[in-house]
Amino acid sequence: MKNIFLDGAISAQFITEQIAKHATKTGIGAHNIFLGQVRADVLNDKVVAAIDYTTYKEMALEKMHIIREAIFAKYDLTCMHVYHSLGTVKVGEISLFVFTSSKHRRAAIDACNEMVERIKNELPVWGKEIFEDETYTWKVNN
Amino acid sequence: MKNIFLDGAISAQFITEQIAKHATKTGIGAHNIFLGQVRADVLNDKVVAAIDYTTYKEMALEKMHIIREAIFAKYDLTCMHVYHSLGTVKVGEISLFVFTSSKHRRAAIDACNEMVERIKNELPVWGKEIFEDETYTWKVNN
Amino acid sequence: MKLKVFGQLVDLIGSNCIEVIDVNDTDKLIQQLQSKYPLLKNSKYRVAVNRNIIQSNTILKQDAEIALLPPFSGG
Amino acid sequence: MKLKVFGQLVDLIGSNCIEVIDVNDTDKLIQQLQSKYPLLKNSKYRVAVNRNIIQSNTILKQDAEIALLPPFSGG
C-alpha cells in the first residue's frame, strides 16, 4: 500500500522536485496542484498557531488506494500524487498536496478537485488546532 | 499594466519561490495551481519538439487586466498570479502558470479553472509547434 | 477485544486504545461504551470494523479490528 | 496606417506589420486585404481596433491601432 503521509509540513522544495520529475513525461500537457495551507483562524479571540494531524493509518491507506483506483478509472490521467502531513504543521505551512497530470487539462483539473473533496470527506484524518496559548480545539471540516 | 510574460520556459524553481512567498499570508487556507506543459504531440508522423509563443503584448496585458478584475470581483480570492512564456519552450517544459489563493478552497479552485479557460480563449497569444525536423505548424486550442 | 479511538474521542475516553469485553456485535459495543462514557451520547462518531465504516449492526468476531471515528478533519 | 499581423497570418501575408492606405472603415480594410492576399478568404481571423476585437464594421481614424488576429492558441 502506497504511503501518502509525511512527517510535518510539506516544503515548497518538495513540491518543486515533484513538478520537475514530470518534465520527462512528454505526453503530459497539464498539471493541476492543490495545496492546503494552515490558516491563522481566530476562534473565541484565540489565534490558531498550528494544526496537529493524526490518522488511522491502516484504514486511511486502504481508503486512499480505493479512491485512487476510482479516480484513475473515471479520468484520463497520466499520474496522480497525494501527500498529507502528520504531526505538527504551523500556520503558513502546507499540509496537503494533491498533484494530477494529464494530456488535456480537463482530466487533471477535475480529478484534482474530486480528489481533494474525497480526502476531506473520506480519509480518517483529524486535525487538532493548537492556539498560541497552547490550548486547542478539534478542527471541523465544512 | 502588470506584465505576465516571461522569456522562455517557467522553471520549477520559479514556481517554488512563488509558493514559498505565500507562507507569510496566514489568512490563506488553499492554493490552486495550473501548469501547462509542452507535449510531444505527433502530427502526420512528426513529433513536436518545442512551441514558439508570440503575443500581441499591449492587447494581451490590457485583456489580462480586465479578466483579473472580473475574477477578483467574482471570487473571494486572497491573490492570483499568472505567468505565460514567450519564445521557445521545449517539450516537457512549463509554458503557463496560474496560481490562485483563498481562505476556503472553493474560491481558489474555481477562479483558477476560470482563469485558465479565459487565457486559452481570450488572450492574443499564438503557439507555433516546431517539429524535430524544424518544420512547424500552428497550434490549435480546443 | 481492542478498540482504537481517534481524534476528539481520545480526550473523551482518555486513551487511544481500550479493551472491550463481552460484546459480539456493534450495537452491544455502543451500549457498553455509552454506559461507561455517557458523554459519547452527545458526540458524533462512526464505528469501523476491519477498516470499513459500518452502516448497521455488525457481528464482531474475536479478531475484528474495531475503531471509533469522530468526523474527519484532514486536509 | 499600420496593420499589425500575428500568428499564421504572418506566414500568409509575409510580414508582421504592413502599411494600408485609403481605408476608412474595417469593411474596406478587409476588402483591400482580401484582394491583395486572396488566401485570407480561407482563413479564420478577427480584426482588433485599438486593442478591442470588433463585432461589426468600424470607422478607422488615422491614429487607430489595427491588428489581424488568427485564432488564439496560448497556454
Image: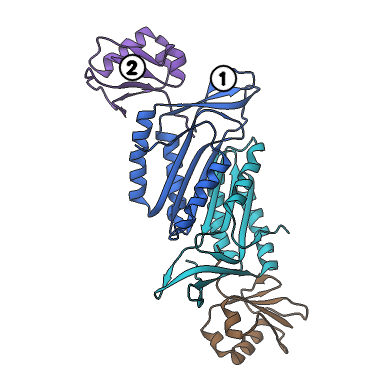
Chain colours: A cyan, B blue, C brown, D purple
Residue B96 against residue B30 in the figure, above or below = above
Whether labels 2 and 1 share one chain: no
Q: Which mark is residue D3?
A: 2
- Report x, y in % for residue D62: 22, 17
Q: The residue marked by circle 1 belongs to what chain?
A: B
- Report x, y in % for residue A51: 54, 68
Q: Quadrant of residue C61?
A: bottom right
Query: Dot 2, crowdedness within 10 Å: few (<14), some or many (≥20)?
Result: some
Q: Are marks 2 and 1 in contact (CB under 8 Å)?
A: no
Residue C63 against residue A14 in the figure, above or below = below
Q: Viewed as shown, does residue C25 lie left or right of C73?
A: right
- Report x, y in % for residue C74: 56, 65
Q: Quadrant of residue C29?
A: bottom right
Q: The residue marked by circle 2 belongs to what chain?
A: D
Is residue B124 or residue A102 the one in the foreground? B124
Quadrant of the drawing holding the N terminus of chain A: bottom right
Is residue A64 or residue A47 the one in the foreground? A47
Is residue B33 or residue A94 the one in the foreground? A94
Q: What's the amino acid at mark 2?
A: Leu
The residue that mark 1 highlights is B136
Q: Residue furthest right?
A: C63
Q: Viewed as shown, does residue B55 lie left or right of B62?
A: right
Q: Secondary structure at mark 2?
A: strand
